[in-house]
Image: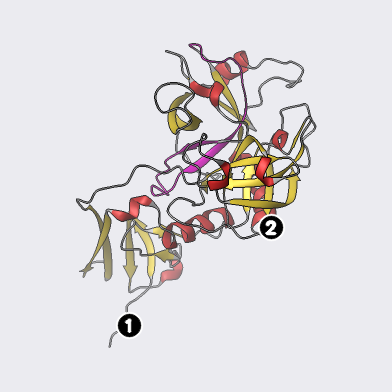
């Protein structure tokens, strides 16, 4: 049986399998062919590769109605095989969207009477990404519990899957009450059990990416209407550096004002925005072209300038700025 040559490079999204010397082009043999997703590429970066593994192995909703078909055509002129991929969407009934990567943070001496005052994002089997200011709260002390798989804030907390916090890690340059470097990690004592309702998010981690996220989403618990307490997704637009610097001038918690290197701000210029309903530490997320199956986390909610008015904006810690620090702890 003839052995097929390795994949050597890509033409757009199509991997090219070459019969010639692969050393003259970038070696991208770490490609995962999953029949329910598009091609997934391992790059050697820890955050990227863990996301690839998660998307490949776990039950993200997008995989329920997707099938990828691969074709192979030999090109005699280049002496290469060209591998094509066609993604087909099958007519199946999809379940309601699940914001399965959200976690709530609990405080107090008893898990059954804990106060759930902040939020975070599941990013691995044992780690939650959150805001550093959430690690300790006045009057209630340090965060002690993590709840996941939450669809409605008004559900009895006894129904939520909960985990004890083993380790609390603030960014080493975080100095409260300042909101610079407002990012932290929580390690759970037990491994988080993944399911369709509880899944890790990906991190926007490629420093060379030119992808622009003009819009992104936040998660809020509805405080109005007939479905109070339900989790919903709200779309915000990105403000540019000049606008953010106007929204966030120097003050007590931002001595030098807005920092474009480590912060981003999103909001709505047309009408009231629900950022005032966000929990500190909750994710700002978007769909990346690299990982369309899972949310990519762009930011961590730090605080909002105003609440419920046109032009409201939320300030978020820029996750990509902190990827080396996150990787050194979560995937060391």
**Location of mark 2 (residue):** 189
- How packed mark 2 is, by other alpha carbons closer than 10 Å (few <14, some 14-19, many 20 or more), is some
Residue at horizontal 50%, vertical 30%? 220
Label 1: few (<14), some or many (≥20) within 10 Å? Answer: few
**Quarter assignment of residue 304:** top right
Residue 222, percent from left and from top? 47, 27
The quarter holding residue 191 reads bottom right
Point out the stretch of residues depicted in magenta: 283-310
Residue 52 position within the rendered picture, expressed as x and y whole percent measured from the top left: 47, 58
227 magenta-colored: no
**328 and 72: which one is in front?**
328
- Answer left or right for 196 relative to 71: right
**Is residue 30 visible from the viewing direction of this image?**
yes
In the picture, the quarter occupied by the C terminus is bottom right
Q: Residue at x 33, y 55 (%)?
A: 63
Residue 3, above or below 306: below
Q: Could you tell me which residue is drawn at 55 percent across and 19 percent down?
A: 313
Residue where numbered disc 1 is placed: 3
């Amino acid at each position: 049986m003839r052995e097929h040559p390795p994949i050597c490079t890509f033409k757009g999204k199509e991997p090219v399998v070459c019969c010639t010397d692969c050393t003259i082009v970038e070696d991208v043999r770490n490609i995962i062919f999953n029949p329910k997703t598009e091609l997934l590429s391992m790059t050697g970066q820890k955050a990227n590769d863990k996301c690839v593994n998660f998307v490949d192995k776990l039950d993200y909703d997008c995989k329920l109605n997707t099938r990828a078909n691969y074709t192979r055509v030999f090109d005699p002129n280049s002496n290469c095989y060209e591998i094509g991929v066609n993604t087909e969407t099958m007519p199946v009934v999809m379940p309601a969207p699940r914001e399965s990567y959200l976690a709530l943070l609990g405080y107090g001496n008893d898990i059954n009477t804990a106060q759930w005052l902040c939020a975070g994002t599941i990013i691995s089997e044992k780690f939650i990404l959150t805001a550093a200011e959430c690690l300790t709260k006045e009057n209630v002390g340090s965060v002690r519990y993590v709840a996941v798989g939450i669809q409605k804030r008004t559900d009895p907390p006894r129904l939520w899957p909960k985990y004890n916090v083993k380790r609390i890690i603030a960014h080493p340059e975080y100095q409260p009450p300042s909101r610079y470097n407002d990012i932290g990690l929580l390690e759970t004592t037990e491994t988080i059990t993944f399911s369709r309702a509880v899944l890790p998010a990906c991190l926007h981690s490629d420093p060379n990416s030119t992808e622009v996220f003009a819009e992104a989403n936040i998660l809020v618990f509805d405080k109005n209407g007939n479905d109070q307490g339900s989790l919903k997704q709200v779309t915000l637009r990105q403000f540019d550096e000049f606008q953010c610097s106007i929204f966030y001038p120097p003050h007590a918690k931002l001595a030098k004002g807005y920092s474009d290197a480590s912060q981003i701000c999103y909001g709505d210029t047309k009408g009231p925005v629900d950022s005032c309903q966000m929990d500190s530490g909750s994710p700002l997320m978007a769909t990346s072209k690299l990982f369309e199956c899972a949310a990519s986390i762009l930011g961590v909610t730090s605080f909002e300038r105003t609440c419920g008015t046109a032009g409201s904006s939320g300030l978020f810690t820029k996750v990509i700025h902190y990827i080396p620090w996150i990787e050194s702890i979560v995937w060391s």
